[in-house]
Image: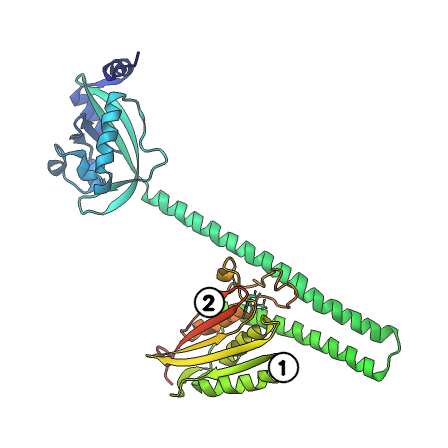
């Protein structure tokens, strides 16, 4: 036979704390925690002073009020149902285990709480005492710990990416230098071969040099140690110059310029902007192994210049697109495995763009190509140019 609520209550009440009203008041006074006594209708019968100051009320304002006034609106209906269940089978327990509970102060602000509920017979009438713990500080600590753990995890990822870049890229260049210089040392060669080998060694040494420079540059920028050497720059003229010289390095790609007729001047560091554009254009070339058109567009949009670089190469998978501006993310996918890279180019580009108070983002369709967007303010905030 199913148990009736009154049976449950009589079983529970046998082991329940019994107290008189005057003793209850003494007990509330000495408790170090915020305590609220309610009757079965959910009316606040008494609180101690800790509860009053926690919720910002005086006793006159709070005693006799429904408990609802201490709850954010969205919890009130569920709380009434919960209270009914509780009084039909009253046991000491934590409330809402696994739930995020909130209290509401008189001024309407909310704060996270843990609540423990205890049934009690006051002068033989069933009541409930809830002990309320303000867990704001605890939650802040948990969140701070979580944030630190995420940062640590991020740093660990960066560190292992960094190690694999050093391992792969530096080792490849060094192995090639070792190989060719070994050949020169151990065997006699025609002067044409010697020149070839020396050329390979030179190219690898340049690559190593560039990688070390990039590593140090990124480090310096991230620490805010790199300064901009500002001047007014005709961005169209800069793009024309760079594409002309890059056009000489590839026969499979064609650069098309669609430049704003206004000839916008922007305030920037010429060498750093050259680094940004060269990097994006060489990526456009590098990641379009079949060749194709590379379209560069500028347009003035209000106080900004919008620069875009579109290629028709391998594109970027959606799963990794969010990672490509993070350091050392040379994407080791099937399509890019044979393409050399350290994953340092785009993080440096992003840092430089942000140093110019600009913004960079990318759209891409795998197999169809990528479109990098850059937005620069024409004039920087707080400079004296
Ligand atoms: P790297 O080219 O040295 O690996 P980057 O930081 O320049 O480093 O680029 C990071 C990653 O972003 C590359 O490994 C590549 O997967 C992807 N990527 C960058 N530019 C393009 C592009 N134009 N098309 C396709 N993928 C690109």
Residue 95 percent coordinates (x, y): 31, 31
Residue 110 as seen in the image, left or right of residue 145:
left
Give the quarter of the figure containing the C terminus: bottom left
Residue 364 as seen in the image, left or right of residue 288:
left
Secondary-structure class at tag 1: loop
Residue at 33%, 40% (x, y): give it: 100
Residue 259 percent coordinates (x, y): 44, 84
Say if disc 1 is inside 8 Å of ligand 1. no
Disc 2 residue crowd, few under 14, some 14–19, many 20+, Cα 10 Å: some
Say if disc 2 is inside 8 Å of ligand 1. no
Residue 373 as seen in the image, left or right of residue 26:
right
Residue 178 percent coordinates (x, y): 77, 69
Nearest the viewer among 314 and 139 is: 314
Nearest the viewer among 268 and 239 is: 239
Instruction: Identify the mark at residue 251; answer none if there is no mark.
Output: 1
Camera sees residue 29: no
Disc 2: which residue: 363
Q: Where ligand 1 lies, by image quadrant?
A: bottom right
Disc 1 residue crowd, few under 14, some 14–19, many 20+, Cα 10 Å: few
Camera sees residue 106: yes
């Amino acid at each position: 036979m199913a148990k009736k609520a009154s049976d449950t209550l009589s079983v529970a009440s046998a082991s329940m704390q019994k107290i008189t009203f005057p003793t209850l008041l003494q007990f509330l006074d000495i408790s170090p925690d915020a305590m609220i006594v309610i009757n079965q209708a959910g009316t606040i019968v008494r609180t101690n002073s800790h509860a009053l100051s926690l919720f910002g009320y005086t006793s006159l304002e709070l005693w006799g009020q429904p408990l609802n006034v201490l709850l954010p609106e969205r919890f009130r209906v569920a709380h009434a149902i919960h209270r009914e269940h509780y009084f039909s089978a009253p046991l000491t327990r934590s409330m809402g285990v696994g739930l995020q509970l909130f209290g509401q102060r008189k001024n309407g602000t909310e704060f996270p709480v843990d609540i423990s509920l205890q049934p009690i017979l006051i002068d033989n009438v069933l009541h409930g005492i809830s002990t309320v713990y303000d867990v704001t500080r605890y939650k802040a600590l948990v969140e701070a710990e979580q944030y630190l753990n995420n940062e640590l995890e991020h740093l660990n990822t960066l560190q292992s990416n960094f190690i694999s870049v050093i391992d792969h890229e530096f080792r490849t260049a060094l192995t090639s230098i070792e190989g060719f210089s070994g050949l020169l040392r151990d065997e006699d060669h025609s002067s044409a071969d010697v020149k070839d080998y020396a050329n390979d060694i030179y190219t690898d040494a340049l690559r190593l040099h560039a990688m070390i420079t990039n590593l140090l540059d990124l480090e310096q920028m991230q620490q805010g140690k790199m300064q901009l050497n500002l001047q007014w720059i005709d961005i169209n003229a800069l793009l024309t110059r760079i594409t002309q010289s890059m056009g000489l390095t590839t026969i499979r790609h064609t650069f098309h310029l669609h430049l704003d007729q206004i000839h916008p001047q922007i305030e920037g560091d010429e060498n750093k902007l050259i680094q940004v554009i060269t990097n994006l254009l060489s990526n456009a070339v590098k990641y379009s192994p079949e060749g194709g058109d590379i379209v560069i567009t500028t347009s003035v949009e209000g106080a900004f210049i919008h620069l875009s670089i579109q290629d028709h190469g391998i594109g970027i998978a959606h799963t990794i697109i969010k990672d490509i501006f993070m350091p050392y993310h040379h994407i080791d996918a099937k399509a890019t495995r044979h393409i050399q890279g350290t994953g340092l180019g785009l993080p440096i580009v992003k840092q430089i763009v942000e140093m110019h108070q600009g913004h960079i983002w990318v759209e891409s369709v795998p197999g169809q190509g990528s479109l990098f967007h850059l937005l620069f303010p024409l004039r920087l905030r707080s400079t004296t140019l």
